[in-house]
Amino acid sequence: MQRKYLFNISFLLSLLLLVGACKEEEYAIPTLRSEFQNDCIKRNLGPNLIGNKMEFAYAMALPPNRGRILSAQVEASIAGAPGTYLENRSFHTDASRVDIGVPIGEPAQTAGKVTRVDFTADTSAATLRYYYVIPDEARGQQVSFTFSASSSTGENVSYTMGPYDISRMDIALDLNVKDGETSYISIADMAVYDATAAAANADKIDLVYLYRALPNISFAHALVAPAADPQYLPEVTLPAGVNKNTRLRKAWGLRDQQLARLQFGIFIDDLDFQQIDLSDAPNYGINMRAESGAWVETADGRYRAYIFINAVDNANKSARISIKRYAL
Amino acid sequence: MKRYLKLIVLCLLAPLAWVSCKDDFPIDDDGLLITKRSQCFVSNFELLGADFLTVRSKNPVIDTVACTIDVEVFYGTDLTNVYPQFSLVTDAKLDPKIVGKMDFSDLATPKVFTVVSGNRKVRKPYTVNITVQQ
């Protein structure tokens, strides 16, 4: 009796497995949507810095037998700085990964917050790129974008992007410092000065760059606060009034993409400057190497910055630096 | 049939009984296993700067008899913010624990770390002597 039940149960279970295994999901060709459609992506990464460009790709299409695109426009919540534009070429990428642009209309017209392109080409699909140059007015605020397009069928589509946080940071790229010449760094001005200019802007000089090849000591390229122990400023005569006690902490492996422009996807953002504690940091950093950096806090507590060493040149006793700065 | 069922149940229960009767391994206050090892020494010592790169100018000299670690650091090292790292013999632990950066700037008063053996019965205080490259 029991054996009979066991056989029955086994048979039923096998049948169930058979049914499950044989089930096939049939592929159905997606139905073509006939309405006017649009889509958008943001193409750049990292913090949105004043003066930098935010880049978008806006795509719009409708079936060719229904009509053509008449216009496309973007409205930003804060008007872009000069240089903001919507491409009048529709881009696609070919098999060699080269962007190919096909003109679809006259160059874009910008009026206040709105940038618009009127199509002259008879096309039912286009992908336009939009470059928004971040204005100073947007510092610390949020900005959003409304992309919209109209077609000859009378349909209008729109796509909202954002809001995006606009950074409070400033950036200065590729400042050349040279020992004994342009060796005075001002975080307040995001600039480097020689001794004469440093004397004229003494209250703004935060760091001194120097290069020393000392026997038995790894000194090399150094960033030193003017108020540091004189042993870290060998043979340096500071201009009158240059005496700030800037704090800095060396960093390694922090190759911010916007400063280094290398392949590393690392970004220093406002939050990093807000949270870093440099209260116990020293006022000197010696033996700095290429692709290293230093977190800096000015003596008056007004600014925090990250100085990245893009390149060093021992023979010329010089270096190329880039700075991100955050006003506290 | 009934006999087969009984056998199956017995086979399933037997491992359970064996597992439940096994003794627990002893652990210490930190939840670490107390073993039978009595070895107690430092095998390597590292000192990292705020940029997480070594600040040692040469290999450390570790005397496991005198229980000293002599380290020379680069000129200009900020000793107020360094991260020490000890490599210990298997199962040993360090007291006090290292939980972050430490201040080694008081060269006249070297820091002392105690190595505790795996059986937690042997304790050896190691003194870290730091000199700065000149």
Image (cartoon, rainbow, N blue to C red):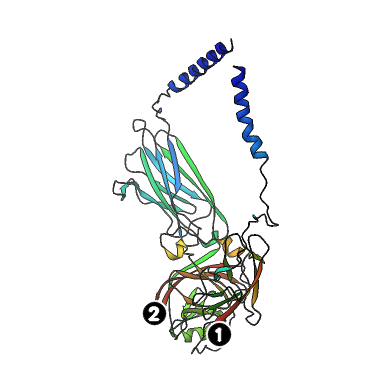
A56 in relation to A274, above or below: above
Residue visible at 41% across and 63% down? Answer: A261
Task: Give the residue at mark 1.
Answer: A242
Asked whether residue B108 appears in the rendered view, the answer is yes
The answer to which of B71 and A46 lies nearer the viewer is B71
| Helix, strand or loop at mark 1 | loop
**Residue at horizontal 53 percent and vertical 48 percent from the top:** A162
The quarter in which the N terminus of chain B is drawn is: top right
Question: In 3D space, how far apart are the residues under numbered discs 1 and 2 (Cα atoms)?
Answer: 26 Å
Label 1 in the same subunit as label 2: yes
Q: Is residue A131 above or below residue A221?
A: above
Which residue is farthest top? Answer: A1
Residue drawn at x 48%, y 41% as measured from the top left:
A158
- Residue A137 in the image: above or below residue A232: above
Residue A243 horizontal/vertical position (percent): 58, 84
Q: Chain of mark 1?
A: A
The amino acid beneath tag 2 is Asn
Q: How many marks?
A: 2
Give the chain letter at badge 2.
A
Picture coordinates of residue A192, whole percent (x, y): 47, 78
Marks 1, 2: nearer the viewer:
2
Report x, y in % for residue A163. Answer: 55, 50
Answer whether residue B77 is visible to the viewer in this image. Answer: no
A43 is higher (above) or lower (below) than B21:
below
Q: Amino acid at mark 1?
A: Val
Q: What secondary structure is found at the residue carrying circle 2?
A: loop
- In the picture of the structure, the residue carrying the numbered disc 2 is A314
* Picture disc at residue A6: none
x, y (%) of residue A143? 54, 53
